Image (cartoon, rainbow, N blue to C red):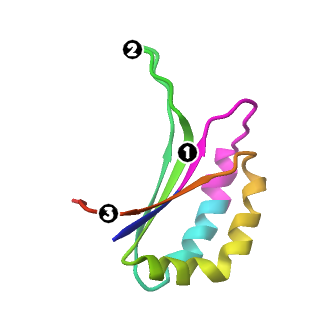
Amino acid sequence: MFNISSIYRIKDGYEFNFNYYLNKHMPRSIELLSRAKGFKGVSVERGIDIDEPKIESSYVAMCHYYFESLEDFMAAFGPHAEELQGDIANYTNIEPTIQISEVKISK
């Protein structure tokens, strides 16, 4: 299984509209990608800070798509890449880091 992650690192002057991201962008993304061959699941995480002990998150948000193979993801994402990437400016000024990982353990 493969995990394709979009990671939004905190930077000075960042903006991130979670309402738009969670209620517009992600539902559309899930609608388009979840019906594809090899789709296994998706998760979205929001970074939080802790006051005691003081721990500050490095990331605003992370989105993880899971597919049976990298080829399945590429086939699912390719036709919708322009739409989904074009929507990023509607919720953030952070350029996401893309991480592609092969999942070795998942329970």
Q: Which residues are magenta?
A: 6-24
Q: Residues within 10 Å of mark 3 (few under 14, many from 20)?
A: few
Compared to residue 23, the image places residue 38 above or below, namely below
The x, y position of residue 54, in whole percent, is 45, 15
Q: Earlier in the sequence, mark 1 or mark 3?
A: 1
**Label 1 is placed on what type of residue?**
Ala
Q: Earlier in the sequence, mark 1 or mark 2?
A: 2
Compared to residue 97, the image places residue 87 above or below, namely below
* Tag in front: 2 or 3: 3
**Label 2 is placed on what type of residue?**
Pro
User: Is residue 98 shown left or right of residue 90?
Assistant: left
The x, y position of residue 78, in whole percent, is 62, 80
Judging by the rendered image, the residue that carries numbered circle 2 is 53
Judging by the rendered image, the residue that carries numbered circle 3 is 103
Query: Considering the image in quadrants, where does the C terminus appear?
Result: bottom left
User: Is residue 34 shown left or right of residue 93?
Assistant: left
Residue ID at (23%, 59%) = 105
Quarter of the image holding residue 6?
bottom right
Secondary-structure class at tag 3: loop
Judging by the rendered image, the residue that carries numbered circle 1 is 61
Residue ID at (45%, 21%) = 55
Compared to residue 70, the image places residue 27 above or below, namely above
Q: Residues within 10 Å of mark 2 (few under 14, many from 20)?
A: few
Q: CA distance from mark 1 to mark 3?
A: 20 Å
The x, y position of residue 69, in whole percent, is 39, 78
Residue ID at (78%, 54%) = 89
Is residue 13 inside the magenta stretch? yes
The x, y position of residue 93, in whole percent, is 75, 45
Is residue 45 inside the magenta stretch? no
Quarter of the image holding residue 90?
bottom right
* Tag in front: 1 or 3: 3
